[in-house]
Amino acid sequence: MRKLLNCITLMLVAFGLVMTGAPDAFAKKKKKIPKKPSYVGAVKCNGSCHDPYYQAWVNTPHGKSFASLKAGEKGDAKKAAGLDPEKDYSADPTCLRCHTTGYRQKGGFKPAGSKTKKGKDTSTAIDPEEPNKEQVGCEMCHAAAGGSQFRVVMKNTKGDFKKSDTEKYGMRWDYANVCSRCHMHPQSPHKDEKFDYEASKSMVHDKEKYFSEDNMDQKLEKVEDRAAETAVSQEKPLRIEEWKFKKSGKLKFKKGTRPYSTKKKKVLYKKE
Ligand code: HEC
Ligand code: HEC
Ligand code: HEC
């Protein structure tokens, strides 16, 4: 009998604790910001927040950049770059840095054949119906080292955030500069490329025609307020990476060219 009473008391206490804790738990539905930035992939930006951007992006060359690496694709462009049109470049590190999202970086794309030391397959799954990390995704233009952190900031604030709130988590607003991570880059094999930011920026996600009744609630309410704000990276563009590859295919950035330091948790700007 005594045991039973004890048990009931315990249950009542526990119940009481849960109930007093409950309203608090409901109020604080905010998610914790991950400690380090990592790549999450374009699919995470789709499906409730930025669907029209995703749909527009899928239909641009950036949303199809992986296919160009396959044998037999875009033969003329490959010839022009001194490449072999019959060769399959879809696991070639020297191409993947610019043709995919976060190649071999935290959370980023890993090509077929990637393994841990113990032989476990770590290659990124590819779904042809749903372009994701295997393409030049959102994070290659919007993030210094991946969007995992500022994605939580956007969610927690329900879109009501300032540029500065996201900038410290590696969101970048240096749009005219960010393209040069790949376009006209000194390490590009496409030596005769011409690139004009002003002429091409509207094609990156020409989203207007993808808004419908179903996703109208995703129109960004604060976009005008943000446009009036100048982010630090708009005045001081971020560093542009230069790189080399280890034998294992691992990407190594040249000293002083990384746009984000995970150790210092800091965005790094170009030297003036
Ligand atoms: C991570 C590398 C990367 C970044 C950053 C990047 N691009 Fe690209 N871009 C590519 C690749 C790769 C292609 C070719 C895709 C394909 O067809 O295979 C491409 C193709 C294009 C094309 C079509 C081909 C051409 O040159 O006319 C345009 C336009 C373009 N990008 C504009 C932009 C703009 C504007 C930005 C910056 C806001 C930008 N890109 C940032 C990698 C990048
Ligand atoms: C420094 C970044 C960079 C690297 C490295 C790079 N590319 Fe590209 N690639 C681009 C950009 C930017 C474009 C779009 C502009 C252009 O067509 O010149 C592009 C375009 C292409 C296209 C033409 C797509 C089209 O629609 O015409 C092919 C094919 C291609 N790349 C293949 C490759 C292959 C194969 C490699 C590796 C051997 C490679 N690229 C390495 C940035 C890069
Ligand atoms: C090739 C580079 C590039 C890629 C890839 C890209 N964007 Fe953008 N994005 C831009 C540029 C440039 C602007 C600013 C456009 C302008 O000034 O007209 C922008 C603006 C935006 C904005 C408005 C931000 C604000 O508050 O002002 C959102 C939201 C956005 N992009 C989401 C996405 C999503 C989601 C994806 C992936 C599905 C994506 N972007 C892929 C370059 C890119």
Image: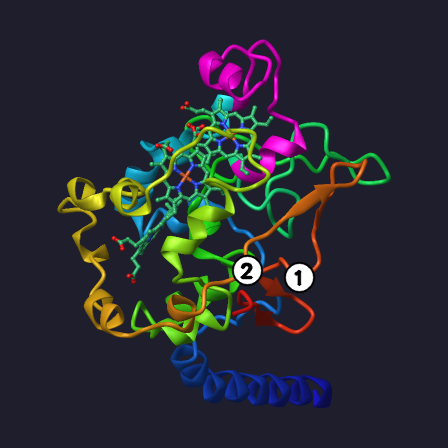
Q: Is residue 201 left or right of residue 26?
A: left
Q: Amino acid at mark 1?
A: Gly
Q: Are marks 1 and 2 in contact (CB under 8 Å)?
A: yes
127 left or right, relative to 265? left
Going by the numbered disc 2, the residue's amino acid type is Arg
Is residue 133 or residue 29 the one in the foreground? 133
Give 170 or 18, whichever is nearer the viewer.
170
Helix, strand, or loop for circle 1?
loop
Check mark 1 vs ligand 2: CB closer than 8 Å? yes or no: no
Residue at far left of view: 213
For mark 2, give the secondary structure.
Answer: loop
Q: Residue at x 20, y 41 (%)?
A: 210
Quadrant in the picture for residue 245: top right
Q: Earlier in the sequence, mark 1 or mark 2?
A: 2
Q: Give x and y (percent) for residue 21.
A: 49, 86
Estimate the x, y position of residue 191 in percent, counting from the top left: 51, 30
Q: Which mark is residue 256?
A: 1
| Structural crowding at the residue carrying mark 1, measured as other residues with C-alpha within 10 Å and reported as few (<14), some (14–19) or many (≥20) | some
Inspect the magenta stretch and tell me whether residue 83 lies in it.
yes
* Mark 2 neighbour density, 10 Å: few (under 14) some (14–19) many (20 or more): many
Please say if 82 is above or below 19: above
Q: Position of residue 211 (x, y in %)?
A: 17, 45
In this picture, residue 34 sits left or right of residue 222: right
Q: Residue at x 70, y 87 (%)?
A: 1
Determine the residue positioned at 28% across, 74% down. Answer: 229
Query: What span is colored magenta in the figure?
Result: 69-98
Residue with the mark numbered 2: 239
Residues under labels 1 and 2: Cα distance? Answer: 8 Å
Is 217 drawn above or below residue 163 in the view shown? Answer: above
Location of ligand 1 given as a quarter of the image = top left
Q: Residue at x 52, y 70 (%)?
A: 272
